Image (tube, coloured by chain):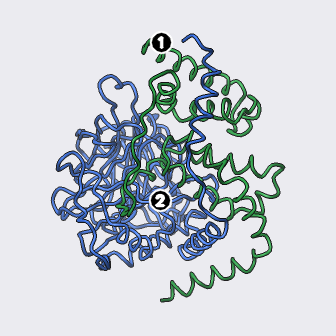
Chain colours: A blue, B green
Amino acid sequence: VTEDLEHVLRRTLSDRAATAGEWRAAGAELRQRAATRTARRRHVGTLAASALAVVALLLAVVGLERGYRVPAPAVPRPTPTSERGGGSALQVQVPDEVVDDITNRLALGDAALTATTRLPRSRDIAMLFVSDQRAATPSRLVASTVTYDGATARPGSLVWVADSDPVVALPVRDQAQDMLFVLAADWPEGEVEVTTAEPGQRPRTQFAPLEDGLAVVPVPGPQVVTGLRVLGPESDRAEEYAQIPGGGLLPEDVPRWLPQIAAWSGTGSQQSVQVRTDGATACRFTVNGRVEHAMSWNLFDQACAPVDGRLRLLLADDRQYSSVTGLAPDDATSVRLRWGDGSVTEVPVTPAPPYAFVDTSGRRPDQLIAAEALNQRGDVLATERP
Amino acid sequence: VDELVTTEAAQRRGTEARDGVAPSFDAFVAAHGAALQRTAYLLTGDHGAAEDLVQDTLVRAWSAWARVTRADQPLAYVRRMLVNASISRWRTLSRRRLRERLTDRPPELPVLDPPGVDAQLWLLVGRLPARQRVVVVLSYYEDLSESEVADLLGIAIGTVKSQRAKALRSLRASLAEEEL
């Protein structure tokens, strides 16, 4: 390079800028577009303003759970089957009219279609929309899924995403199978490693290739997915990313990698409470399995504590409508819960470390007076009060 | 139907309330739209993406027009919005053409660049990481000082320096590899 690089750079950029094309949009046109967008947002509600608003949106989504029929395009359109890579299931094209109709009917506001994929069993198209919630503090995006079978669109799940998040993972339903829809913006190639854990079983991992940054991974159920890692191509293995799917809802001090479910209550089809751990920290989560596949990871109001061999209560802030969970000392086999009305409940402790418990009696944590860890002989090893 | 009525009513209210300041926005768009599009093209390297980026930024700017006009330099404020939007990886992904777009215009004819440092450099600028590319464009096209770039991006001056140095080092190394 004989010429000064910075000088050449200035000249190159200036020359290229001159080819940027003619500016055509008028202010009035842009104002009109802004008005439409604002009105749509007003209709949706200020989604990101509060947890309550999200719950309201969730209810709206639940109301539409059965889906609605999307009108066929008014004019003949090219068949939306142009898939990349000669039959690749990823990045399926969808006609503009269908996308516009879905965003309007499902009140997705100014959400942009960011990724699509063809689900392997049903051959439905799963669509990932991302909308901007910059008005929220902190600024963030909302990612949501919709499945479309060619006639009917069904809303799926949603999570918050930070601009800086390199990965979005949401569950989608493919007939009776739950799938994890993963979009990794920075890794067009590589692999996704998904960890699932079920109570009493060792965590399991499975891998799926990334194609154009997308992967669809079958999972036993969204609530048992405890971790996600993206592994770049061979030369790029060091660049890994791990998180709990839906971790965008968590405060920064909650570990994102909690691969093991230590204890849980409920079944796959009901709302359940889980104690998840990475061995050092344990957190209590409410997993909303009650709605089939909307908001499968409801991570609001979690509580965390160090795994240090002491009796620890993990209580959500909502002590009226939650349940008592916690960690027990090493030798404990059960925890006795003493309630304000004088009654007691004895809850078994999981047999393997980290020793955890979940009270399934339905009692309210705000009525809890004390918890006592008991060994097999019934000796009180430790007492903890809320 | 309710949705449409709500939408139209909200549009009407918004439009009526802001009729007074619309001329200043329209004038801003007329005066600076082309310049913003040039910057956007350098940031994205794609004509369609640049157009989308600028229009989207201006739509947002109108939604916050009172705040924009209160800024010392409205153009700098909008440019900051543009640059930040160009860095966001998710917005970049959204700009991928996943949706069919029918057009009666044939695709643009390919431009045959004359071989040389300039053409090669443009390709290499397009391969820079987003933040380095932004720093390069703001420094060498917009001619902003280090402190102005730092202020615009909300980062330290030292970070601007290091990002620019990395970018130049990378460009220089790549050009040397090509023996240009």
Q: Amino acid at mark 2?
A: Arg
**In the image, residue A17 above or below residue A28:** above
Query: Can see residue A349?
Result: no
Left of A362 or right of it: where is A4? right
Front residue (pair B109, B1): B109
* Quadrant in which residue A61 is drawn: bottom left
Front residue (pair A65, A357): A65
Q: Which residue is mark 2?
A: A338
Which quadrant of the rendered structure holds the C terminus of chain A? bottom right
**Element marked by disc 1:** helix
What is the C-alpha distance between the residues marked 2 and 1? 75 Å
Seen at 42% across and 73% down, the residue is A106
2 vs 1, front mark: 1
Q: Which residue is mark 1?
A: B176
Front residue (pair B26, B1): B26
- Badge number at residue B15: none
Where is residue A226 drawn, in percent x and y?
34, 45
Seen at 60% across and 62% down, the residue is A25
Q: Residues within 10 Å of mark 2 (few under 14, many from 20)?
A: some
Seen at 35% across and 42% down, the residue is A227
Where is residue B148 drawn, in percent x and y?
76, 35
Numbered disc 2: what chain? A
**Element marked by disc 2:** strand
Where is residue B15 drawn, in percent x and y?
69, 77
Q: Amino acid at mark 1?
A: Ala
Q: Residues within 10 Å of mark 1 (few under 14, many from 20)?
A: few
**In the image, residue A5 above or below residue B143:** above
Which quadrant of the rendered structure holds the N terminus of chain A? top right
Query: Can see residue B8?
Result: yes
Numbered disc 1: what chain? B
